Image (spheres, rainbow, N blue to C red):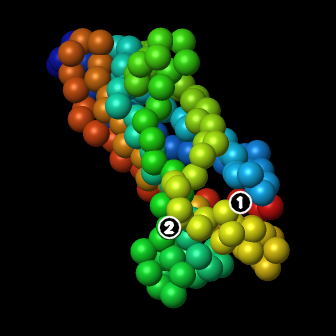
């Protein structure tokens, strides 16, 4: 009985997790905008994990943080929020969209956003929000595939996070 429990404890896969650890270095200038999001990836298994196909999308929410929390991320006049970034992660060491996490450990990953979706009008809205309320509200959506080194695949892990960033 004990041996069965121990065997199952060590061999049954545990779901991985992903979250945003921080959103920092927001810089708005006439020429554009730049900021950094730090993601955390947790492997809860006794095997190493490889994360692949990380894709992020960032939206600018119009309104206050209270309205966004209670009513969701919306754009001007209750429309769809403005998408300001969409892209895939590229590991600077390998030029591939994948990275490892050891067994029962966490990996942090900084993603620096330096370009806005062309024609989004987001730069003007972000400047107006900074001047009127002192912050911007962003919605980050991310997804990534996780696979253990023993061959077990978890499929897609999804993240939806609203972040208030002071100017």
Residue in the image at 51% along x and 54% along y:
117
Residue 167 position by quadrant: bottom right
Between residue 149 and residue 15, name the one nearer to us: 149
* Relative image position of residue 20 (x, y in whole percent): 56, 45
In this rendering, the answer to whether 91 lies above or below 108 is above
The N terminus lies in quadrant: top left
* Residue bearing mark 1: 165
Number of residues whose C-alpha sits closer than 10 Å to that of mark 1, classed few (under 14), some (14–19) or many (20 or more): some
Please tell me how many numbered marks the rendered image carries: 2
- Left or right, 31 with respect to 144, comes to right
Q: How far apart are marks 1 and 2 (CA)?
A: 16 Å
Q: Residue furthest bottom?
A: 77
In this rendering, the answer to whether 96 lies above or below 64 is above
* Relative image position of residue 114 (x, y in whole percent): 64, 42
* Residue bearing mark 2: 82
Between residue 4 and residue 62, name the one nearer to us: 62
* Relative image position of residue 149 (x, y in whole percent): 29, 12
**Residue 117, can we see it?**
yes
Residue in the image at 53% along x and 26% along y:
106
Q: Which mark is residue 99?
A: none
Between residue 83 and residue 70, name the one nearer to us: 83
Residue in the image at 69% along x and 46% along y:
34
Helix, strand or loop at mark 1: strand
Number of residues whose C-alpha sits closer than 10 Å to that of mark 2, classed few (under 14), some (14–19) or many (20 or more): many
Helix, strand or loop at mark 2: strand
If you read the primary sequence from the N terminus, does the residue marked by circle 1 or circle 2 appear first?
A: 2
Label 1 or label 2, whichever lies nearer to me, is 2
């Amino acid at each position: 009985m004990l041996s069965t429990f121990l065997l199952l404890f060590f061999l049954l896969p545990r779901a991985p997790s992903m979250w945003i650890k921080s959103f920092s270095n927001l810089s708005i200038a006439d020429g554009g905008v730049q900021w950094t999001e730090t993601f955390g990836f947790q492997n809860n298994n006794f095997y190493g994990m490889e994360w692949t196909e990380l894709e992020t999308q960032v939206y600018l929410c119009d309104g206050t943080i209270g309205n966004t929390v209670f009513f969701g991320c919306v754009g001007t006049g209750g429309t769809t929020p403005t998408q300001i970034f969409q892209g895939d992660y590229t590991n600077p060491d390998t030029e591939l969209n994948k990275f490892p996490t050891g067994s029962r450990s966490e990996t942090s990953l900084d993603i620096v956003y330096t370009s806005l979706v062309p024609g989004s009008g987001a730069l003007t809205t972000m400047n107006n929000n900074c001047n009127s309320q002192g912050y911007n509200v962003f919605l980050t959506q991310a997804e990534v595939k996780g696979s253990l080194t023993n061959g077990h695949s978890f499929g897609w892990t999804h993240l939806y996070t609203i972040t208030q960033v002071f100017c």
